[in-house]
Amino acid sequence: MTRYLFELWEGLLIALRAIGSHKLRAVLTTLGIIIGITSVTLMATVIGGIEKQFDEDMAELGTDVLYIEKWPWMTGPGFKWWNYINRPNIEARLADVINERSVYAVAAVPVVSTSRTVRYEGVTISGVSVEGSTSAYPLVRTVNLERGRFYTDLEVRSARAVAVIGAGLAERLFPLSEPLGKEIRVAGHQFQVIGVMARKGSSAEGMSEDNQIKIPFTTFSNLFGTRWRSVSVQVRVEPGMLERAQDEITGIVRVARKLDALEENDFEINQQASLREQLAPIKLAIYSIGIGLTALALLVGGIGVMNIMFVSVKERTREIGIRKAVGAKRRTILIQFLIEAIIVCLLGGLIGIGISLALTGAISLVLPAYLPVQTILVAFVICITIGILFGLAPAWSAAKAEPIQALRYE
């Protein structure tokens, strides 16, 4: 064991001296590895960020929440929109019917939204999402409040002009003051701020509750109208009962909408699982393209390392002959050149990871970006693997060289 460790240490020192004596060549050799590792880590960063954001968005939708809506969530090639546009709108009263008749529903709430302009004193913000629902909304969807409270059932029944605003809106409308109790104007209508939601950040689709206002459904109906809007009825069901609940609620909705037994559903029941299934092929295609491109970059980098290692072996043929003449074994020579190839790849990988870390911050401004420690460790493993695979042929050619012929080499 001591002999093997000594051989490794000696091989490491010789490899470092060889790299140090040709610094420029070593740097140029690592360019391919730098590009390859940067591509790998950046691809993993972007895909990991999108995957993490997607999971967070799916968690927001809820694994045990059903969405009764006019339109399906996913539409692909061949989607026949004319089959859906003439469907009757979903009405808010459907939530009451489900609450009364469903065995598996924990709570059902109507949700309707619009985009309006919000003003406070001299600050005006356009395109703000205004969402109306009932006081039972927190029983269906998670609502994290940073301060204040959600509107009550009494405020819903009396159509009070109260609002819960997102953290982003709070910062922009009230940069230096406390928002609770302040009066804001939504499309010219006065609302009192009673709560501020905790910051969530943008979703994968670029949307965010940070720039949203939640108001009572009755208030929304009085001010903006719901007659010509299709409401989304959102239902949280008992844990583990999603499939049974979906069948039950389908029957309840069909009866409520007076559909004949032979008529097709004129509504959609959307859920997180179906969205994941339909997006799975898209995610697989993205991963496949990314892996293919990064594998190509690493292949080019590995070929560059192998080429330079063959040059290094040729330049040091006489040195190899001398070492063999004084008793160095094939294994020792092989290990020496393999270590040199691995160090070159690790240097390239280290620089590539450094570039990726620097670029991750810039990417996160445009796309979700997440670079976990596991990705960095995998990148180093890839560097070692490339060093072994592409350094083996040059190292073996050096190891099997005949001492006499190597000594005669000019």
Image (tube, grey):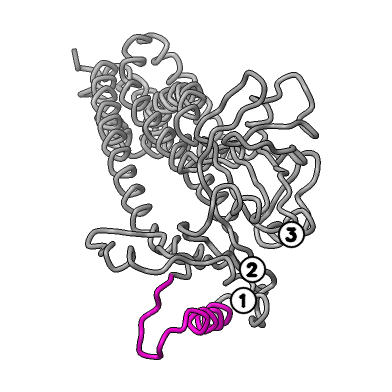
Residue type, label 3? Arg
Crowding near pointer 2: few (<14 within 10 Å), some, many (20+)? many
Q: Is residue 11 visible?
A: no
Question: Which quadrant, please, contains the C terminus?
Answer: top left
In-front residue for pair 383/170? 170
Tell me if label 1 and label 2 are in contact, CB under 8 Å. Answer: yes
The residue wearing badge 2 is: 108
- What is the C-alpha distance between the residues marked 3 and 1? 19 Å
Q: Is residue 208 visible?
A: yes
| Residue 24 x/y as whole percent | 34, 9
| Residue 264 x/y as whole percent | 36, 81
- What is the C-alpha distance between the residues marked 3 and 2? 17 Å
Region rendered in magenta: 244-267
In this rendering, the label closer to the viewer, 3 or 1:
3
Seen at 73% across and 44% down, the residue is: 162
For residue 234, side relative to residue 171 (left or right): left
Q: Which mark is residue 38?
A: none
